[in-house]
Image: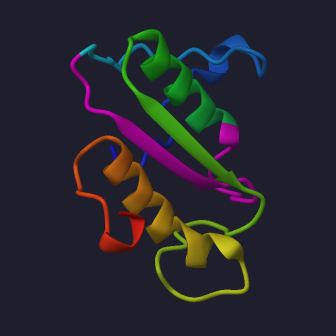
Amino acid sequence: MAYNARVLDNSKGKSNLGLQPWVKISTEAPPTLIIHAKNVQVDDVRQLMAYALTLNEAGVPVDMRLYATGGHAFGMRPTADPITREWPGEVRQWMENIGVLGRSRSDN
């Protein structure tokens, strides 16, 4: 899932991190990396936390990187926020860690 907005069931109050009934997490879901800027006005960080907790409870490997700033849809455009410089490397490292990519030569 590249964009997991609106998965949190807000009907149960702010302290509840349950997902919407239509969201189904399989124990066969692939390892997941979540990268999020907390200053996003569109989606509260609780959306991602709820999704990550549910993946974890299903036994799915999940990693989460939270940045204080970066905004919505930060992508790869350069900004003053560290997220735009760091997230591509975070993804590469994560993919190496789970065995999807081989280690880079500089790491050997």
* Image coords of residue 15 (percent x, y): 78, 17
Is 16 included in the stretch rendered in magenta?
no
Q: Is residue 18 left or right of residue 98?
A: right
- Identified at 43% across, 57% down, the residue is 93
Q: Is residue 52 above or below residue 100?
A: above
Q: Is residue 86 above or below residue 62?
A: below
Asked if residue 2 shows in the view, the reply is no
Quadrant assignment for the C terminus: bottom left
Q: What coloring was used for the rendering?
A: rainbow
Residue 79 quadrant = bottom right
Residue 55 quadrant = top left
Asked if residue 49 shows in the view, the reply is yes
In the depicted view, which residue is nearer to us: 7 or 56?
56
- Point out the residue furthest to the front here: 108
In the depicted view, which residue is nearer to us: 103 or 1?
103
In the depicted view, which residue is nearer to us: 101 or 13?
101
* Image coords of residue 24 (percent x, y): 32, 17
Q: Is residue 106 left or right of residue 81?
A: left
- Identified at 25% across, 44% down, the residue is 99
Is 33 included in the stretch rendered in magenta?
yes
- Identified at 48% across, 18% down, the residue is 56
In the depicted view, which residue is nearer to us: 40 or 56?
56
* Image coords of residue 21 (percent x, y): 42, 13
Magenta segment: 28-45
